[in-house]
Structure formats: C-alpha cells, structure tokens
Amino acid sequence: MRQRMIGVIGAGATTAEGYEVGRQVGRLIAEAGAVLVCGGLGGVMEAACRGAVEAGGQTLGILPGPDADQANPWVTLAVPTNLGHARNVIIAHTARALIAVEGEFGTLSEMAIGLKLGKPVVALGSWPGLPGVIYVRTPAEAVARVVAGFEDVE
C-alpha cells in the first residue's frame, strides 16, 4: 500500500510563530501516518520536517538545486532536482494535499498549482482570500481537514 503524502509549503525564512506552526503541522502529519513532502530547505519546510521526524515520521524534500546536501537536517529522503522554482510543480503533483504556512510568492505558486490540479489546499496564515483554498486557524484543524479528505476518496 502506498503511503499518503501531504505537502507542507511555506517560506524559506519564517517568523518564530510560523516555525512553531510548521513544526506542529509536521508532527501531526507523522502522527497521522503520512509522509511529509516539502521543498526541503529552511524556514517552514525545516520546521515541518523537524516536527515530523521528532514524531517518528518520514520527510521527502524536493530540492531546487543539484545537491542532496542542501537539504535541511530533518529531511530523511532528499531529491535534488536542479530545477529551481520549477520544483514547485513536482511538490504539488507528489502531495495528495497541500498545507500552506505563511509563505511568499513560491508558496503562492504551489497553492495555485495544487488548486489547478484539483488537490485540497489548506492555509494557515497564508495568502488570504484565494478562491478554492480552505482557511483554518490551527495545525490540528489543517491536518484533520486533509486526512478527512483522504478518507472520502478511499
């Protein structure tokens, strides 16, 4: 049976609050038995990977550069693409759903790609007012919404 993959997207530089939210999201993803997929770098990505690994989960980092060593220390599986921002398309395709925490234009692009692909996109303090995005207030609500969506299709 294939493992569920949940994407966590957000800025490479984040606030202390965003880091903690990302870490909680990562922990909850691992506790739900899913693999966390992200861009593999710092900020929200690092926080989410850290939370997942601390909870015994696996993390898949889809890196923009050519070197697996560029991954944050919490990435358990690193995929160097050498595609730069184009790797955002791979992240959106790989994940069955995306959770956005804070974020900048790269996050916005991943959200748009996810929506275009018909995938659930959940946001915590990220890009308000986008049609089709599910806005939530807590990490628990974000992960619960995504996991509930899995159960609807299985």
Image: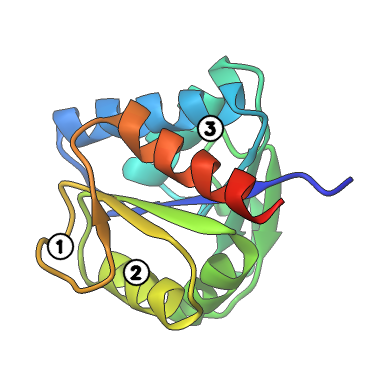
What whole-number distance in Å separates the C-alpha atoms at marks 2 and 1?
9 Å
The residue at 68%/34% (across/down) is 58
The residue at 39%/71% (across/down) is 110
Q: Nearer the viewer, residue 63 or 145?
A: 145
Q: Are marks 2 and 1 in contact (CB under 8 Å)?
A: yes
As helix, strand or loop, the secondary structure at mark 2 comes to: helix
Residue corresponding to mark 1: 127
For label 3, the crowd category at 10 Å Cα-Cα, with few meaning under 14, some 14 to 19 and many 20 or more, is many
- The disc at residue 29 is 3
Identified by mark 3, the residue type is Ile
Q: Position of residue 106 (x, y in %)?
A: 31, 70
Quarter-wise, where is residue 46 in the image?
Answer: top left
Residue corresponding to mark 2: 111
Q: Are marks 2 and 3 in contact (CB under 8 Å)?
A: no
The residue at 35%/39% (across/down) is 142
As helix, strand or loop, the secondary structure at mark 1 comes to: loop
For label 1, the crowd category at 10 Å Cα-Cα, with few meaning under 14, some 14 to 19 and many 20 or more, is some
